[in-house]
Structure formats: structure tokens, C-alpha cells
């Protein structure tokens, strides 16, 4: 058989062997902007090392293997004993081990920790998204546990360890631990006050026996879980270890693993408690208030995770268009494709810039910044996570049929994209949370308006959008029915303000013209043709070293 038809030409080389961090100009600039200059050299070295690992062929193989070989539940051993263990592919453990060793659970214990950790999370998530779930929950458990200083003293050093120590053993015998969370139940979902899991006080002060279920419990092989249950005085937060101090297994019956759209590498489970030992965290009846700091931190990770998926999708699309030729020239030079790529790049850069700004507010810790986060986190979580799916879908289309096949990696990005919009409260939950903050915490709105007001006069379209937003905020009649419209506008104004301050003029101009000025269609690739779109695309291109 003649082999001439098998000569491969006009195909983009794999996007591999590059530094995911240094190739992302928006991310590099955000780190330099928000970190103390004394920390920058160390942070750059750490993030570049992680970036090279994330862009390596090895990490890409791990991501494929972890998703092609999803976790398997073993409820019993060969003798009929209940074991409730989930078996993961070795690639899962390698991904998770790298995340932990890279400090993605140590934000609370080092200077500039949240910015450094957010940048690292954004970089490493591009290798594979599913394992970010236990990483995120482990990181986020720290502020909730601080409601009980004794528990925090015991568990925080384990949670912030850079040692990944897999396997179920008493936490005291491990060099590092992971945490999960169980809030929702089948009859209530996001309405956690409808939870029916009961907590019966035991003789030892602060200890309880739990009976009930959790409808979604991710990463069930974690060492401990923060869960909500009804105690005598109402909904209360509890710490549930998988293994008790004497080495016995705490009753934690995994009924099944969820068969999900995406996020295949991660085990999401349904669990039953039957006399399960637990330690109270915070006061009885204050469960939501106790766990809310964990929820806020994981919501920020939803923003960061979505920014990571968008960045990888855009990098793949721009890389493909740079090498692929059609109709007499490179795709990236075709005006229409350039418009699509620039539009996607704007969405990605706006998400990254906002995510790092929120992380910097965590590092600052002032009352002003904490008030700002109260509105900015749910607004960002609402909007950025919703933009992820259309970005991934359009980026896939940029690769054409090549993007529709599994080997490209684009279908996995697309299946992963909706997750962060659902996890930790879907869109309506975020919108209602913004309304509660507006109604109950006037200092939050003041902090938000101060933030976006720093750019007043810099761009007339941004000024107009802020004026329109103030008009919306002044009319609270029927506010719930238009909450999504309001929160979308808040997120866009915040992103526009940040880009006007920090992004190159061509990026800020394109964003304000389209997202705030109304010169935009209903699909990507409808930016005004008069903008400098080539510069926007060039800024977003990943830098791949030449082949030897």
C-alpha cells in the first residue's frame, strides 16, 4: 500500500514542554502586582517550576490516565467486612502529591500565601481539574476549624503540610492529611437548613454520634470531613474523622459513587452515618456561620479553577491557530478567527485578573478587604464560573474536528467546565447571597464601590456602567427577580475596573467596548473590528520552546 497519503502535514504540534506560568502574561503580572517585592523571586521560582511540571508530557499523561481510569468503590473485603474504600489510579496520587508538595494547601501559614497559592492552583489545575477538589477543601477547612482553637492547633499543621500521605490511618500517625466536606442532603440540596442528619451528644464534652446521610460527599478517602447536622440547638458543624484515634474505622458507609458528566478522576459519593463519632466545631446552632468561611474559600477556588480551565482552553486554541493553515494563510492571521481568539482571550484575562485580586484581599485581611470579599466572591463565583463553559466550547470549535476528539484534551475541558458553577452553590444561590450582603452589610457595598470607583474618569464606558449599576442598586423593588442581571453587571464592572487599571490598553479597550459599552454580539468573535485584536491574541499565546 502506498504510504504517501499518510504523510502528516499542516497539523499543530502538541502543546507540551512549556512553562504554564511564565507563558501566562496576565497571571505573571498579577503575581508581580499583588506580592511583596521581597517575596517575588522565590514565588517566581516556585511557580515557574510548577508551571514546567504542569506543561510537561508527564503531567499531561497523568491527567489522561486519571480520567480514563476513574475511581472504583469497594464496599466490602473478601470476607464480607465493610471497608468503604475507594481505589484511585496511581496517576491521581501523583497529581495530588504534586499539588500538596507545591504548597497548594499552605496559604494560611506563609507570607503572601493566598496570592502564591491561587497562582499555583491556577497553574496546576491546567494539568487536571478533578484532583483540585480535595486540595481546595483541605485548604478551605483551616478558617472553619479556627472556630475551635484546640481543634485548629491539632489539625492545622496536618492540613498545611506539604507531605502527601495517602491511605486510611489515624491522623496522628500521618505526616499530612486531606479534608472533605458534607453539607447537602437529598431532600434539601442547597437548603442546608432542611438537613435531617441528627447529632446526639455523647458523654465526653464536644463529642457526638451522627445518624443520617450526605447526598454529595467528594473525595471520600480524605482523613476528615466538616459536616452539618442537627443538634439540640439547631444546625451545627462537626468534624468527622475517617479513622478514629485507636485505629478503628469510623462508621462511614459509602453507598455509591456518582456517575458524573465530567470530573471523572474525582470520587463524589453518597454516604451514610450510623452512630458516627464526631467532634463539634463552634457552638451548637451556629453551623452555617462556622462553616461559611470554608464555603467562601472554596467559592474562590471555583473562580480560580474556572480561570484555569479558560486559560488552558484559550492556550490550546491560540496554539492551534498559530500553526494551522487554511485558505492561504495561518488561521491566527485571519481576521475572523483573530476576532474569536481575542474575544476568548479577554474572557480569560478578566477571570485571571479578578481571581488574583480576590486572593490578594485574603492576604490583606483588613476590614475593608474583608467587606469587599463579602460581595466580590459570590459575584465573581456567579459570573466567572458561568463564562467557563461557553469559553471551553468555543475554544474547542477553534480546533474544528481535531478538537472534538478525546485525544485533543478539549472534550475533557468542556465536560469539566460546568462543575464550578454548580459546586458550592449554583448561580441562584450566589445571586441571593449577594442580595443578602447588600441588605444586611452596607459596608460591603461601600467597599465594592470604593474598589470600582478608583478608575472613575479613566474610561467613559466603565463610568457609564457604574452609573447604570448605581441606578439598579437604588431600586430594590422586585430585586430578587432581577438578581442575576444585577450580579452579572457587578462582576463585569469589577472586571472592567481591574483591566482598566492593570491590563494593556488594547485589552482594557476591547473589554470595555464589548462587555460594558454594548458593542458586542451574542457569540464570541463579535468584537468591534476597529480594535487592536492582534495584540490581544499575541498576548495570550503560550510560549513553547523550539524543538531540539
Image (spheres, grey):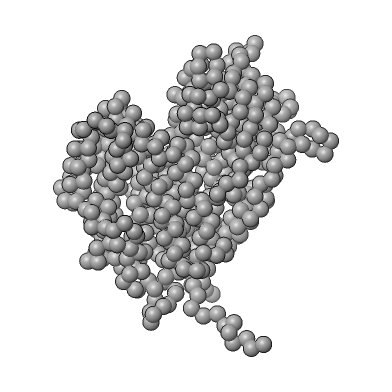
Which residue is at a point 59% across and 31% down the rendered structure image?
214
- Give the position of the N terminus as an image quadrant: bottom right
Q: Nearer the viewer, residue 401 or 380?
A: 401
Using residue 30 as the reference point, say whether residue 415 is left or right of it. Answer: right
What x and y, as percent, mark residue 162? 57, 41
Where in the figure is residue 354, as x and y percent of width and height? 35, 46
Q: Nearer the viewer, residue 163 or 447?
A: 447
The relative height of residue 321 versus residue 170 in the rendered view (above or below) is below
Residue at screen point 68% across, 31% down: 253
**Residue found farthest to the right:** 79
Q: Is residue 364 visible?
A: no
Q: Position of residue 547 (x, y in %)?
A: 52, 73
Residue at figure coordinates x 79%, y 38% from the top left: 77
**Relative height, residue 239 to residue 382 (above, below):** above
Name the image quarter holding residue 221.
Answer: top right
Left or right, 324 with reference to 278: left
Residue occupying the point 59% across, 18% down: 199
Q: Left or right of 529: which side holds 341?
A: right
Foreground of the two, 102 or 143:
143
Left or right of residue 373, residue 158 in this image? right
Q: Measured from the top left, where is residue 225 in percent x and y?
A: 58, 31
Classify residue 452 by image quadrant: top left
Amino acid at each position: 500500500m502506498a504510504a504517501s497519503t499518510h504523510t502528516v502535514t499542516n497539523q499543530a504540534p502538541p502543546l507540551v514542554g512549556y512553562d504554564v506560568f511564565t507563558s501566562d502574561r496576565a497571571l505573571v503580572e498579577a503575581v508581580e502586582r499583588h506580592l511583596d517585592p521581597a517575596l517575588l523571586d522565590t514565588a517566581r521560582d516556585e511557580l515557574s517550576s510548577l508551571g514546567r511540571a504542569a506543561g510537561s508530557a508527564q503531567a499531561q499523561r497523568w491527567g489522561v490516565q486519571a480520567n480514563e481510569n476513574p475511581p472504583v468503590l469497594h464496599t466490602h473485603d473478601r470476607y464480607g467486612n465493610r471497608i468503604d474504600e475507594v481505589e484511585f489510579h496511581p496517576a491521581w496520587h501523583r497529581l495530588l502529591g504534586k499539588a500538596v508538595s507545591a504548597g497548594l494547601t499552605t496559604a494560611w501559614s506563609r507570607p503572601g500565601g493566598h496570592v502564591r497559592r491561587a497562582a499555583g492552583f491556577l497553574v496546576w489545575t491546567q494539568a487536571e481539574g478533578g484532583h483540585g477538589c480535595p486540595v481546595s477543601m483541605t485548604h478551605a477547612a483551616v478558617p472553619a476549624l479556627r472556630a475551635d482553637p484546640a481543634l485548629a492547633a491539632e489539625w492545622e499543621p496536618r492540613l498545611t503540610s506539604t507531605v502527601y500521605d495517602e491511605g486510611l490511618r489515624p491522623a496522628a500517625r500521618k505526616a499530612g492529611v486531606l479534608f472533605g466536606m458534607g453539607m447537602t442532603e437529598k431532600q434539601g440540596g442547597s437548603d442546608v437548613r432542611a438537613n435531617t442528619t441528627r447529632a446526639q451528644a455523647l458523654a465526653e464534652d464536644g463529642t457526638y454520634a451522627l445518624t443520617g446521610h450526605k447526598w454529595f460527599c467528594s473525595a471520600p478517602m480524605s482523613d476528615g470531613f466538616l459536616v452539618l447536622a442537627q443538634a439540640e440547638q439547631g444546625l451545627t458543624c462537626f468534624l468527622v474523622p475517617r479513622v478514629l484515634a485507636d485505629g478503628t474505622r469510623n462508621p462511614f458507609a459509602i453507598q455509591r459513587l456518582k456517575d458524573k458528566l465530567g470530573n471523572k478522576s474525582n470520587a463524589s459519593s453518597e454516604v451514610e452515618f450510623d452512630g458516627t463519632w464526631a467532634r463539634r466545631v463552634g457552638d451548637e446552632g451556629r453551623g452555617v456561620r462556622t462553616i461559611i468561611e470554608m464555603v467562601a474559600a472554596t467559592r474562590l477556588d471555583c473562580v480560580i479553577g474556572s480561570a484555569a480551565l479558560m486559560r488552558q482552553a484559550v492556550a490550546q486554541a491560540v496554539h492551534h491557530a498559530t500553526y494551522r493553515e487554511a485558505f492561504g494563510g495561518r488561521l491566527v492571521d485571519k481576521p475572523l478567527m483573530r476576532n474569536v481568539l481575542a474575544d476568548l482571550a479577554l474572557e480569560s484575562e478578566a477571570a485571571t485578573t479578578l481571581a488574583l485580586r480576590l486572593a490578594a484581599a485574603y492576604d490583606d485581611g483588613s476590614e475593608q478587604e474583608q467587606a469587599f470579599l463579602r460581595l466580590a466572591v459570590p459575584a465573581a463565583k456567579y459570573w466567572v464560573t458561568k463564562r467557563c463553559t461557553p469559553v471551553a466550547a468555543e475554544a474547542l470549535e477553534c480546533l474544528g474536528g481535531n478538537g472534538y476528539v478525546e485525544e485533543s484534551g478539549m472534550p475533557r475541558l468542556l465536560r469539566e467546565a460546568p462543575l464550578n458553577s454548580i459546586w458550592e452553590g449554583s448561580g441562584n444561590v450566589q445571586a441571593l447571597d449577594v442580595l443578602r450582603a447588600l441588605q444586611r452589610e452596607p459596608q460591603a457595598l461601600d467597599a465594592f464601590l470604593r474598589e470600582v470607583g478608583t478608575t472613575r474618569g479613566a474610561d467613559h464606558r466603565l463610568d457609564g456602567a457604574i452609573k447604570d449599576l448605581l441606578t439598579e442598586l437604588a431600586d430594590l423593588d422586585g430585586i430578587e427577580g432581577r438578581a442575576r442581571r444585577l450580579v452579572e453587571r457587578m462582576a463585569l464592572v469589577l472586571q472592567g475596573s481591574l483591566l482598566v487599571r492593570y491590563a494593556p490598553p488594547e485589552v482594557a479597550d476591547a473589554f470595555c467596548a464589548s462587555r460594558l459599552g454594548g458593542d458586542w454580539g451574542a457569540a464570541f468573535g463579535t468584537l468591534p473590528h476597529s480594535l487592536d485584536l492582534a495584540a490581544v491574541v499575541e498576548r495570550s499565546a503560550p510560549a513553547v520552546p523550539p524543538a531540539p
